[in-house]
Image (cartoon, helix red, strand yellow):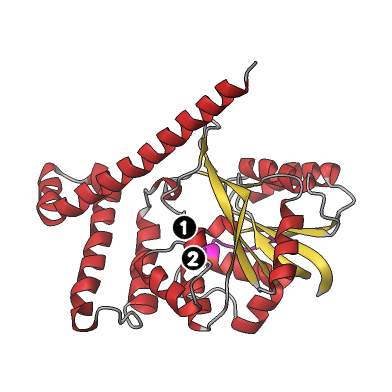
């Protein structure tokens, strides 16, 4: 392990175009010790894309980039295995992954991360993040993130675990850690294929690991379907596994009513799966889904509308502030 070095892992599967934007934000960093590990998860287009990517990375790297590693799995194994194998290659004291198209905000983002961990004594922290749409619009209120960091930072690991039993309120793009965290508490859990973060946050809370929370927005997260509150069938299959193996055996908050609560949580996931598969359903299947999960569909619409309203108000405030700045 090299003291002071930050290992940035960029996991890739098929989507090579977004890597350039991510790398550009890394090359702009003022932090002096960085290694980049580009870890491909068996992409069928790897051989045709990697020469161009390698040429770009090597020609744009700065003196701060101490090494660039090009790693490839021979076949697609999923995000969890890809990340774990890449983390074992990391030589840095600090570690973070950046998905293609996600970018570091500001040239001092990595410097702020390191400063926070050193000042707080924590092994892992989360910054705030913003979403960005395909058209470039900034979205501050996200379905995939907690907005109440002030409250989260007051919680003990046990209290945060209870919060995580409800939903994953810790945004995956926003974390930053010392590699010591993974060496001490293990790497991502092999209970899922695509969702690497949620089971691990639950694991850390169970191990009573304190988590730090920053007020700085250091990550701009490209909004995919999951960032908008829409999920793929593969993602939801992982969520079923997380509930079964990481949540239901340990969540005891509701005593004798716990089985009923767990049933409701499963029904909610079933409703999300219905929404994901909606375009493939026959009229009869859609009618059956409405009869069974109609209340959940209405709740989804309500929460989607609530998030959209918050973002609209935020946009109006931003426009108003810009207008006041004009002479």
Residue range (magenta): 71-79
Name the residue located 53 percent from the left edge and 67 percent from the top edge: 153
Residue 198, position as x, y percentages in the image: 47, 67
State the residue at coordinates (79%, 46%). 27
On screen, residue 252 versus residue 58, left or right, reads left
> Distance from label 2 to label 1 (Cα)?
6 Å
For residue 148, the mark is: 1
Query: Is residue 130 toward the left or the right of residue 268 in the image?
Result: right
Near-viewer residue (223 or 90): 223
Left or right: where does residue 166 sit relative to residue 320?
left
Q: Name the residue carrying label 2.
A: 152
Q: Is residue 77 magenta?
A: yes
The answer, for residue 171, to whether it is visible in the render is yes
Q: Secondary structure at mark 2?
A: helix
Q: Is label 1 in a helix, a strand or a loop? A: loop
Q: Tell me: residue 312, above or below residue 88.
A: above
Circle on res. 324: none
The mark tally for this picture is 2
Mark 2 neighbour class, 10 Å CA radius: few under 14, some 14 to 19, many 20 or more:
some
Residue 67 screen position, x and y as percent: 84, 59
Q: Quadrant of residue 305?
A: top left
Q: Nearer the viewer, residue 61 or 44?
A: 61
Up-down relation of residue 303 to residue 118 (above or below): above
Is 187 inside the magenta-drawn segment? no
Q: Are marks 2 and 1 in contact (CB under 8 Å)?
A: yes
User: The C terminus appears in which quarter of the rendering?
Assistant: top right
Q: Is residue 256 above or below residue 213?
A: below
Main SS category, magenta section: loop
- Residue 13 in view of the camera: no
Local crowd size for mark 1, using a 10 Å CA cut-off: few (<14), some (14–19), many (≥20): few
- Residue at 25% x, 78% y is 254
């Amino acid at each position: 392990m090299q003291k002071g070095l930050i290992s940035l892992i960029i996991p890739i599967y098929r989507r090579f175009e977004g890597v350039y934007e991510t790398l550009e934000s890394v090359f702009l960093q003022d932090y002096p010790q960085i290694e980049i590990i580009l870890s491909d998860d068996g992409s069928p287009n790897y051989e045709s894309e990697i020469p161009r990517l390698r040429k770009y990375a090597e020609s744009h790297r700065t003196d701060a980039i101490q090494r660039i590693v090009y790693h490839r799995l021979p076949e697609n194994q999923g995000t969890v295995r890809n990340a774990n194998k890449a983390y074992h290659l990391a030589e840095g004291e600090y570690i973070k992954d950046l998905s293609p198209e996600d970018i570091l905000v500001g040239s001092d983002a990595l410097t702020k991360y390191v400063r926070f961990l050193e000042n707080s004594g924590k092994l892992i922290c989360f910054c705030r993040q913003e979403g960005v749409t395909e058209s470039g619009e900034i979205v501050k209120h996200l379905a995939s993130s907690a907005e109440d960091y002030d409250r989260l930072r007051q919680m003990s690991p046990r209290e945060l675990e209870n919060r995580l039993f409800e939903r994953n309120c810790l945004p995956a793009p926003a974390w930053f850690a010392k590699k010591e965290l993974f060496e001490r508490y293990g790497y991502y859990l092999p209970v899922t294929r695509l969702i690497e973060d949620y089971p691990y946050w639950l694991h850390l809370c169970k191990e009573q690991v304190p988590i730090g929370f920053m007020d700085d927005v250091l990550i701009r997260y490209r909004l995919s379907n999951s960032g908008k509150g829409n999920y793929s069938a593969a993602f939801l299959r992982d969520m079923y596994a997380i509930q079964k193996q990481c949540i239901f055996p340990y969540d005891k908050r509701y005593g004798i009513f716990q089985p009923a609560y767990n049933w409701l949580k499963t029904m909610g996931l079933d409703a999300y799966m219905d929404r994901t598969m909606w375009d493939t359903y026959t009229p009869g299947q859609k009618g059956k889904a409405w009869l069974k999960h109609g209340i959940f569909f209405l709740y989804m619409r309500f929460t989607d509308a609530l998030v959209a309203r918050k973002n609209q108000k935020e946009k109006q405030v931003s426009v108003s502030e810009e207008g006041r700045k004009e002479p």
